[in-house]
Amino acid sequence: MHPQLNIAIKAARRAGQIINRAAQDLDRLTVTKKGPSDFVSEVDRGGEAAIIGILREAYPDHAFLGEEGGAIGSSEYQWIIDPLDGTTNFLHGFPMYCTSIALVHKGVVTQAVVYDPVRNDLFTATRGSGAFLNDRRIRVSQNIRMEDALIGSGFPYSSMEHQERYLRMLAEVMRKSAGIRRPGSAALDLAYVAAGRYDGFWELGLKPWDMAAGTLLIQEAGGLVSDLEGDGQFLQTGHVVAGNPKIFAQLLPMVVRA
């Protein structure tokens, strides 16, 4: 296993411990006067600080881009971190959330970890070495028919600019697929595509920390990922379409036309 991946796994598991410990006190803490949002932001900040602390100890010259702390430092190596993807789920005790860590080298994602602390599911990938779930090799699904496909997605909620376009896409995919799931953690959704649990996925308006790790997992599991133009600029545009090769080829034009 690549040493950079090893350090990222250590950092993700540490964040998972913080999240799981906080989850045990969720009911008690959500009735305090500060309200649940303060509690969750505390978990987010604590998780991110723990991750950066572990990564920085191993790689003091690397740069960081985190959901909470923004961009830190300048280097050809940048760690992209979401300590708790699916914060709203976590807040409600809905068990779909994860920690996502990716390493980008000269603009290319080279290491990926998505850790689900609820199920103790550890998704990992190193560019060129395949994708794994709990040390077992994973591949995208073999489904070739859109009418049999289970497709993941996410509703644009932080910005309403994509709402009408997204609803057209949703209607189109609903008509032509076996079903759509929207659990509320894009990083985990992308990992599920890599593991063959979904046949495809699309979402608009994501941030780099939502998808940097998950997209490498899919590519290393034999899947395809693009932006809405069919290019590889999804980390820049925030729009992503992914799937096994056969479903991706059907899903991309479907959402582009909508």
Image: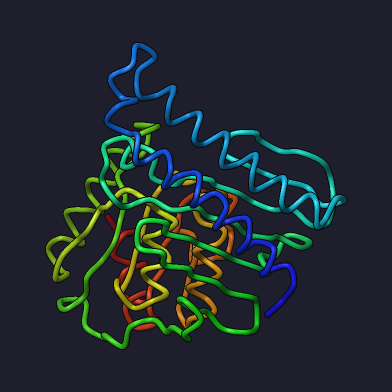
Image x and y of residue 184, in percent: 31, 48
Q: How is the image coloured?
A: rainbow
Image x and y of residue 135, in percent: 51, 81
Rendering quarter of residue 107? bottom right
Quick one: which residue is furthest to the top in this view?
Answer: 33
**Residue 151 vs residue 49: left or right?**
left
Given residues 247 and 49, the one toward you in this image is 49
**Residue 151 vs residue 210: left or right?**
left
Image x and y of residue 250, in percent: 30, 75
**Numbered disc total:** 0
Residue under the point 29% across and 61% down: 152
Image x and y of residue 35, in percent: 35, 18
- Where 107 sits versus 167, above or below? below
**Residue 57 vs residue 48: left or right?**
right
Rendered-image quadrant of the N terminus: bottom right
Rendering quarter of residue 161? top left
- Where 248 sits versus 152, above or below? below
Residue under the point 15% across and 65% down: 179
Rendered-image quadrant of the C terminus: bottom left
- Where 129 sits versus 154, above or below? below
Residue under the point 76% across and 63% down: 105
Residue under the point 31% across and 88% down: 142
**Residue 246 vs residue 38: left or right?**
left
Given residues 74 and 169, the one toward you in this image is 74
